[in-house]
Every structure is written in C-alpha cells, then in structure tokens.
Image (cartoon, helix red, strand yellow):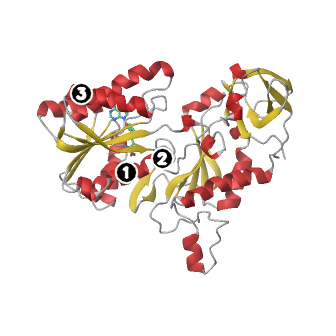
Amino acid sequence: METPTATLLLKNGRDKPVLNRHPWIFSGAIERLKGDARPGDLVTVADHRGAPLATAYYNPKSQIQARILSWDPSEPVDHDFWLRRLRRAIEGRAMIGLATSDERRATSGEPASPASSLPSFPAPQAETTAYRLVNAESDLLPGLVVDRYGDYLVMQCLTLGIDRRKGMLTNRLVELLQPAGILERSDADVRGKEGLRPVVEMRHGQAPPPELAVYENGRQFLVDVWKGHKTGFYLDQRDNRAALGDPALLAGREVLNVFAYTGAFGVYAAAAGAGRVVQVDSSTPALEVAERNMALNGFARPNDEYIAGDAFEVLRYYREEGQQFDAVVLDPPKFAYSQGQVERACRGYKDLNWLALRLLRPGGLLATFSCSGLVGADLFQKVVFGAAVDAGRDVQILRHLGQSADHPVLLSFPESAYLKGLLCRVW
Ligand code: SAH
C-alpha cells in the first residue's frame, strides 16, 4: 500500500475544480508542497487551510502537477484500489455490448454472475474483439489507456505517475484478464510533457504478431499494434462506422472515404452495399492495408480505388475533373494541438468541408469529423455551416456523432469529449 508522503496545498480560492471533481491540478493553482514528494509519488491535495480534498499522484515536471486518483482522501491506494478501478472500467464495457465472458460461461455451463462480466481471453468468436478497456481520466485512471486487440492488450502510459506503476498495473491486468500478451505502446507525444521518452516494448507474455486480425461489428480488420496509429486502430470511430454503414444510407451509392487510414469506413460502406468506394490517404502503407481489409471482407472489387495523396489536392482535382459522389467521409487527423492553433484549424476544417460539399450529388451524404478536443462541437458545427454557405448548399444534420461508448466522457472532465462529427444530407 502507498501512502501520500506530502500535502499539496492549493491557493486560496483555487479548490473549486477539485470540489467539482476535475482530475487535473495545474501549477498555477498550487500554493506549495508541504513535505517531501518525488516525481510520481502520491500526495494529499488540500485547500489553503490544509483540509484534505483528494489523493493524487504528483509530477512537478508537468504543467499538470497532480492528477487525482480519488476524491476521498481517506481511501487507501492499495492493491485492491487498483484492482477495483480496473475492474470497474473493464466491466463497464460489457454494459455497452462489448465481448464478455458470458459466452464462455454459456458454453461451460457456469452460471453468469452479474458481479463479474470481464472479457474472456482468448477472444470469443464475437462481433467485436477490438475495443478500449480503460480510457484514462474518464475511467478514473488518469494517464492509463488499455486497448484490447483479440487475445492481446496494448497499454499506453501517458504520465509519469502511471509509468512508475506500470509493472504493478501489468500484474493487475494479468490477474483480471489473463491475456496472451501485453504490449506497451507508450510512444504518444504527450509523454514529452511529463518528461518521459517513448517506450515500445512487451510487458507480459507472448509478443503479438506484426499483423493481427480483429473483428469489429462482425467485420475483419488487420491491425499492426506495434507501429499502427495510436494503439493500432481508430477504435473511437466504431459506433460512427456502424451508423454510416447502413444499407438505407449507402446501398448502390458511390462513396469517397477521405483520410481512410486502413479503410475501416470503406469496409462498412461496401458491406452496406455501396457500389463503388474510393479511399484517399497520404499514407501508401495504410492504403495497402485498406485494400487488403476490403479483400478480407469479400470486397476485392476492380471498381474501387485507393488514392495516395494529400486530401485537399485530391478533392480539388475531383472538382476540376467534374467527378461526383453520393457520400463523402471526412475524418482528418487532429488539426489543433493548442489554443493558439484553433483558428487555423477551423480554416482547415472549413476548406475541407467546402471542398467535399462541392463534390456531392444532390441528396448526398457528408459524414464529417473533428478529433481536435480544442474545437468544441458547437464551433465545429459553425465551421461546417460556414462551408455550406460558401458552397451554396442546403445541409440537414441527420445525426450528431461522437466517440464510441468505450471512450466514455467523464462529466466532470469535459476535455475527454474530443471526437465530434455530423452526419448530413446535402442538397
Ligand atoms: N478514418 C480512419 C482514421 C483516420 S486517421 C479510420 O476510421 O480508421 C487520419 C488519417 O489521415 C491517417 O491515416 C493519416 O495518414 C491521414 N492523413 C493525414 N494528413 C493527410 C493529408 N493531408 N491528406 C490525406 N491523408 C492524410
């Protein structure tokens, strides 16, 4: 068991966010550290009078000097604490229909117990075997991401506090889930802000192969958990792919999937009966996997196209050529990394949406996304509105889209809502 070695005293009047259960404590809110704490140690967070408010882990090297683990300062941070937190996160995925051991119990005759609905390893013949099990702050485990890919786990340690405890956390994950292997993919840029270097190495068990086949809503995808983007796949788009992959929307239609990565939206579109799918990405290796993913799902079709290039240029080229589509998906990478980049990011989103709108046949569909957390849903909608006005098109919003349910948003931490999208009908 770990006990806090020091108290982080907040400035007078700066305890409101803590009382509101926001997990971050910025350097500017801190009066001083009373006692000794090394980077990564536990500290008690207290108001300016010294009344304890929470337990956090500490990193003086970061702008976010402490991240709260518990708003009950008397809750012990011991073996059971971490197990409870992990279990709570992992069991939450069963509530949203992601693979659990119920199937294993059903076949083994074991009674299903509502108290435990942990996923089973090895992966069942389930509809979905790739999803997020632990979503950091939103699962009250700040800095820790754990994604499941079939029989393997991929973990990201984004903060020093988590990095220091990763051996222990690995053991807890093994206790709970017995995966075939756990790969650490801690190569996200944010680690730099915590004074950490990138790390990619095995933490437990067998190494996953460079190409892993997983299921998502019954479709198969090849994932490179070692080198692929994020932990290998854009799991956060699963629900949106399902929303768009509807025959009522796409049967017989011509679909342009821009920022395709490994073609996930394209596979759903083809499965929904799209007559032709054109996929665009700047990465040739990603598009090669996209083509193989299409084939894996039975869509090796001569009419489909895979175009390596800059999305803005490709969209402009299609306009010049007079090519049109019935549906366009726009899923660009993050444009805004800081408040100072928001304006420029919005100009980028506007251009992109304007270019896409002009390619749509009347009655066509636009599925447009932004994963820039700093561009809120309202602002994004305004940007798309601006693009529609400039393109002279009438646009109806059919659905507001967001990140999949395995990437929950903590109500007291609205920063965790980063992905937003609009499914639109365009005239
Ligand atoms: N829609 C994908 C995820 C897209 S991620 C999915 O569901 O899996 C963003 C993608 O945009 C990445 O694959 C990246 O290679 C690509 N990209 C980045 N900048 C680009 C540009 N200027 N033109 C085309 N593609 C770009």
Measuring 14% from the left and 38% from the top, which residue is drawn there?
A: 323
| Disc nearer the start of the sequence (1/2) | 2
Mark 2: C-beta under 8 Å from nearest atom of ligand 1: no
| Disc nearer the start of the sequence (3/2) | 2
The three-letter amino acid code for the residue at tag 2 is: Gly
Q: Dot 3: few (<14), some (14–19), or many (≥20) neighbours within 10 Å?
A: few
3D distance between C-alphas at marks 1 and 3:
27 Å
The three-letter amino acid code for the residue at tag 3 is: Val
The three-letter amino acid code for the residue at tag 1 is: Arg
The percent coordinates of residue 370 (x first, y second) are 40, 35
Helix, strand or loop at disc 3?
helix
| Depth check, front residue: 97 or 210 | 97
Tell us which disc is closer to us: 1 or 3: 3
Tell us which disc is closer to us: 3 or 2: 3
Vertical order, 405 against 107 (above or below) = above
Which circle marks residue 232 in the picture? 2
The percent coordinates of residue 205 (x first, y second) are 64, 57
Mark 1: C-beta under 8 Å from nearest atom of ligand 1: yes
Mark 3: C-beta under 8 Å from nearest atom of ligand 1: no
Measuring 51% from the left and 53% from the top, which residue is drawn there?
A: 131
Helix, strand or loop at disc 1?
helix
Is residue 171 visible in the rendered structure shown here?
no
Ligand 1 found in image quarter: top left
Vertical order, 250 against 414 (above or below) = below
Q: Quadrant of the C terminus?
A: top left
3D distance between C-alphas at marks 1 and 2:
17 Å
Which circle marks residue 389 in the picture? 3
Q: Dot 2: few (<14), some (14–19), or many (≥20) neighbours within 10 Å?
A: many
User: In this rendering, would 390 be left or right of 243?
Assistant: left
Q: Which residue position is annotated with label 1?
A: 241
Helix, strand or loop at disc 2?
loop
| Depth check, front residue: 152 or 390 | 390
